[in-house]
Amino acid sequence: MQNYTLSQIADLLGAELQGDGATEIKKISTLANARTGHIAFLANKKYRSQLDDTQASAVILSPADAEYFAGNKIIVANPYVCYAKLAQLMDTTPRSAMTGVHPSAVIHDSASIGDNVAIAANVVIEAGAVIANDVQIGPGCFIGENAKIGQGTKLWANVTIYHDVEIGSDCLFQANTVVGSDGFGYANERGEWVKIPQLGRVIIGDKVEVGASTTIDRGALDDTLIHSNVIIDNQCQIAHNVEIGSGTAVAGCTVFAGSTVIGKNCQIGGMVAINGHISVCDGAIITGMSMVTKAITEPGIYSSGLPHLTNKEWRRSIAHIRNLGDMKDRIKALESLTKSLNIEDK
């Protein structure tokens, strides 16, 4: 990891520095765990009290929080974004593949390999595949026939890219991700399942990041579409013909059923289940463990999952739910009785 002085950090991030610019920074830490030589950040005012005791050599702060810290400080409008950019500068993550082509890689003669491509051990690249410049392909990856991978994209170990998939530039795929597998398409003939070949593709834009062990199915007829600047967490399932708009973020273990259309700049929490053949408008926020069964047409925050209860409270609530039908009938009977009594009184 390269060390930076505070002056260098301020210059690189276009930030205001107050304090000793010669102070050397060798690590980013939380306020609570920072030590000498570390820089911390405050992005949530509920941690403001930690400024009193932090041993960080400097803190990244907003103008509103700067008055609460007397030490060296980097002042920016958005400390969390500043932290992200500084973490990129100080990132020590290795390449997914070293420069060049490993001897054990199997590459079809008709595949096109660009300049400065790194291909690790046991990679298989099939006929007609096109790999652009500066791509990194980690060990054990499979690139299917006629697949295209854009410039600067990075694949970690054991990523599988099926035939005809197209991936844009500067994307990142974590280990064991599968792109272009068959969608869940079958017809039933007198109890026997008849497979429907999935004839579409997966088309992925630029600067898309996909977490580990996520699956993106190919389209049945048309294509599955992931637009640029989408981020998808680990272990998500994206079914055939789903479309996800640019700027949308999807947290872990979320499931999209087939032909769902998600708008731009949505935020979808973890373990959300979204029904097929519906749409979600631009800018919608869906909180974790929600079940979306019908279209969302207006931006806003949507929830459906129940917060946890003690087991005793949960059992009592479920008992009430099971009795709702009887309660409804009793209320109707009481309403009828009240109505008849009112008529008799008149």
Image (cartoon, grey):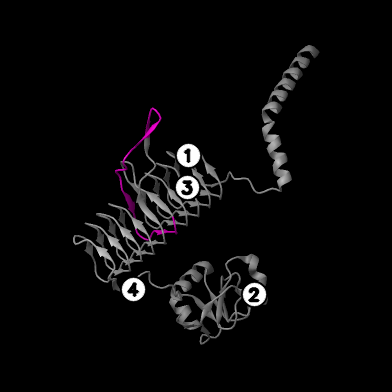
Q: What residue is disc 3 on?
A: 255
Pair 2/3: label in front: 3
- Image height check: is 279 above or below 85? above
For this view, does 303 lie left or right of residue 171?
Answer: right
The residue nearer to you, when weighing 42 against 225, is 225
Do callouts 1 and 2 mark residues in contact (Cβ within 8 Å)?
no
Residue 183 lies in the magenta-colored region: no
Q: Which residues make up the magenta segment?
A: 187-213
Q: Earlier in the sequence, mark 2 or mark 3?
A: 2
Q: Amino acid at mark 4?
A: Met
The residue under label 1 is which amino acid type? Ala
Tag in front: 4 or 1 = 4
* Residue annotated with mark 2: 51
Taking the magenta stretch, the answer to whether it contains residue 205 is: yes
Q: Tell me the CA gap for discs 2 and 3.
A: 40 Å
- The mark closer to the camera, 4 or 2, is 4
Q: Which mark is residue 39?
A: none
Residue beneath disc 4: 98
Q: Are marks 4 and 2 in contact (CB under 8 Å)?
A: no
For image coordinates 51% across by 71% down, the residue present is: 83
Q: Element at badge 2? A: helix
Comes first in the chain, label 4 or label 1:
4
Q: At 67% across and 76% down in the image, what residue appears?
A: 52
Q: Residue 292 at what x, y percent from top left?
A: 51, 42
Q: Secondary structure at mark 4?
A: loop
Rounded to the nearest whole Å, what is the CA distance between mark 3 and mark 4? Answer: 34 Å
